[in-house]
Structures are given as C-alpha cells and as structure tokens.
Image: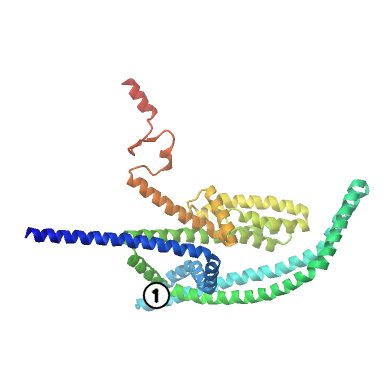
Amino acid sequence: MEDFSRETASEETGGLKLKEHFRKGMTAFLVIAASIVFYFALLRFDYISAFFLRVLNIVKPIIYGLVFAYLLNPIVKLVEKYVKKIFGRRMEQEKWVRGASRSIGILAALLFAAAVIAALFQMLIPELIKSIRDLVMALPGQIQNVIDYLTKLQEGDEAFRNILENILIKGRETFETWVETDLLRQTNALMTGLTTGVISVVNGVMDILIGLIVSVYVLYSKEMFLGQSRKLIYALMPPKRANQTLHIAKKSNEIFGGFLIGKLIDSAIIGVLCFIGVSILKMPYALLVSVIVGVTNVIPFFGPYIGAIPSTILILLADPVKGIYFIIFILLLQQLDGNIIGPRILGDSTGLSAFWVVFAILLGGGLFGVVGMIVGVPTFAVLYYIGKTFIYQKLEHKKLPTDTESYDEKNKIDDAGNFLPAKSEKDKTEEKEK
C-alpha cells in the first residue's frame, strides 16, 4: 500500500515537473516568436504604418462620430433632464418618456451645434471677404509709403543708396529666375493641388455628415455601449484590475470633459470680451480679430499669442497706433483670462503644474500639430494621474508617506525602509534638557 502511494506521489510529482517544463518551453517559444515577429515588423515598418493609416482613414467617420457624441453629450443630458421632469409628471410609461426625452435632447444638441456653426460662418465669411478686400486696396499705398520713406533715407546717404540698389538688383534677378524656371512647374503643381484639395474637401464633408449620423446612434444607445464595454473589461480582466481600469476611465472622462468643454466656454467668453473691447476702441477688423483670438484661445498657454500675432499685424497695417493699443489690450485681456476667468471655469481640471502643461503642449504639438496641442494637456493629465496612482500604491504598500513635502532633506528613510521624520525644535530642546 505504501509502495502504491509512493508510486502515485512520484507520478504526480513527475506530471507537475513535466507541466512546468512544458510551460517554460512554451514561454521561451512565445518570446522567441514574438522577437522574430517584432524584427520583421521593423523591417516592414513602412508597409505596416501605411496599412494603419489606411485603416484610420477608413474609420475616420466613426472617429468623428465619437468626438461629436462626446462634445454633444452634455447638452443632451441637460435637455433630457428637463424634458423628463416635464413628461414625468404627465406620463406613466417610463420607457416612452426615456426614449422621447433622449430624442428631444439629441435633436436640441444638433440644432444648437448647427446654429453655432452657422452663426460663426455668417459672421466670419463676410468679415473675412471685407478684410481681404480692404487689405488689397490698402496694400499698394502702404508699399508706396515704404518706398517713399526709403527714397528719402537714401537721398542723403550714399552708402545706403548703394546697398538699396544692390538689394533691388538682386531681387529683380531672383524674381526673373523664379518666373523663368519655377513658375510654370509650380503652376502645374498648384492646379493639381487645387484638384486634390477639392476632392479632399468633398471627402471631408462626407466624413463629417457620416460622423453626425454615427453620433446620433452613439448618443441614443450610449448606455448599451457603456454596458458592453464594462462587460468586456470584466470578462478579460480580474475583478480588481477591471475596477481599477473603470476607475481610470471615469477619471479620464472627468479630465477630458472638464478641460475641453471648459476651454470652449472660456474661449467663447474671451472672444465676446475681445469684440466688445475692440469695438469700444474703434479698431479695424473687430469681428475678424475677435474670432481669431477666441478660436486660438482653445490652445492652452500658447493660444493667446498665436491669435494675437496675426491680429496685431492686421491692425498695424491699417493703423499703427491702434496696433499698439491692441497689443496692450490683448495683454490685459489674457491676464484677466489667466487669473480670473480661466481658473473659475476650468478650476484644477487637469491637476498639472505650469511646467507639465507647457511640456504636454510642446510634445503634443510636435507629434500631432494643432490637435496635439489641444488634447495634449488632458491626455498627459490622464497619464500623470495613472502614474501618480501607481506611485501612491507602491508607497502605501511600503508604509511610506505619499505627500511630496515629506521627502525633503530633513526627513530620512533608513535602510530597512522606515520613515524617520525630522525632529522639531521642541523635540531637540527636550532632548537637551534630558
């Protein structure tokens, strides 16, 4: 009997060792296979990136739809809340009330977005045409004024006259060479670019229309999509990891929603205040300049300066003195936004210091352009929050403090991992007395 038990135990031990060896072998095989696949992927990186770009271009309407749904969702929720209160008092069918309020909320959000876009175009396009016409009419006179000024300068200065003549000769030769060699080729490229641009605009409009349709479906069935996402997360992850993932997703939504929607409201307020101020000061291109300042204000930190530069140039060309006034006005307006309006609307929605905001803008702008500058801050804020949560968990596991002030030069941590706070002056005095 004992021999049988020993044989059984030996067989079980051998089976466990065999499984362990098999597991190690499969792990080694998968690591080697993944390394080979990664190596060949690097060799075919251009083809792989082209494939992903093609897929991204195909699903672009879906991405637009998700973005539209995310931006319109606060309006839908607000309208739906009030419609439910109105219908809830008179209707007893909860399902019908929920469907009707959702439909009304989506319709109201779409109408609001269409009205805002139409109002912007109605204000911007006529003003833009007028501004371009005024610039075209005023530019020859301004150029002539510059030429007259340079002529007066060179009349009394022989050296300056020679330098100016050389510049004009070189400029004429360069212009003639450009007309003879590059103009025809660039004209052909321009015509090809115009054709391609028209096709791109048509495709972009179609993508936006499809995206709007997708956004309607997403908004109407958002609870179902969220439920499916949660179900998938719990199916693929352990419960603890799934709860952490859902918590991070909820926090990411709070950061993105608070920042993007708050920034849009803040930019609209700045655009309106800019229009009021520029109109009171009777500056030219008031509406165009206000739209430029308001739109570029969506970009954090650098946006006000990006919008102020072309606006200042436009006003300077029309009236240099008012251009100086505009610079002073825009600096005061940005101080008002940065110290009063912005903090009240945005609050601490990102949790980032000024250094990390600038870092996120530069990194996002360098990688993805203007879109990267806008979404770089909330994206980095999410990554920052994830990293901070991970570090806090590790510190709490080691029974160490999580606040940064505890890690100054006065406090110590011994080799055993125990936190030794610095002694206060009172403690030092008591020790001396003892």
Nearer to the camera, 360 or 11: 11
Residue 310 x %, y %: 70, 58
Nearer to the camera, 143 or 74: 143
Q: State which quadrant residue 148 falls in.
A: bottom right
User: Element under label 1?
Assistant: helix
Residue 278 x %, y %: 69, 57
Quadrant where the C terminus sits is: top left
> From what the image shows, is residue 289 above or below residue 100?
above
Residue 12 x %, y %: 18, 61
Q: Can residue 370 be seen in this view?
A: yes
Q: Which residue corresponds to the image point at 39% horizontal and 51% vertical from the top-left?
A: 390
Nearer to the camera, 70 or 27: 27
Please name the amino acid that badge 1 sits on.
Arg
**390 on left or right of 360:** left
* Mark 1 surroundings: few (<14), some (14-19) or many (≥20) residues within 10 A: some
Residue 189 x %, y %: 72, 71
Snapshot colouring: rainbow
Q: Residue furthest left?
A: 1
Q: Which residue lies furthest to the top in this view?
A: 433
> From what the image shows, is residue 311 above or below residue 97?
above
> From what the image shows, is residue 285 above or below residue 338?
below
Q: Is residue 157 visible?
A: no
Residue underneath mark 1: 98
Q: Which residue corresponds to the image point at 58% horizontal and 77% vertical from the top-left?
A: 206
Nearer to the camera, 331 or 178: 178
> From what the image shows, is residue 314 above or below residue 340?
below
Quadrant where the N terminus sits is: bottom left
**256 on left or right of 301:** left
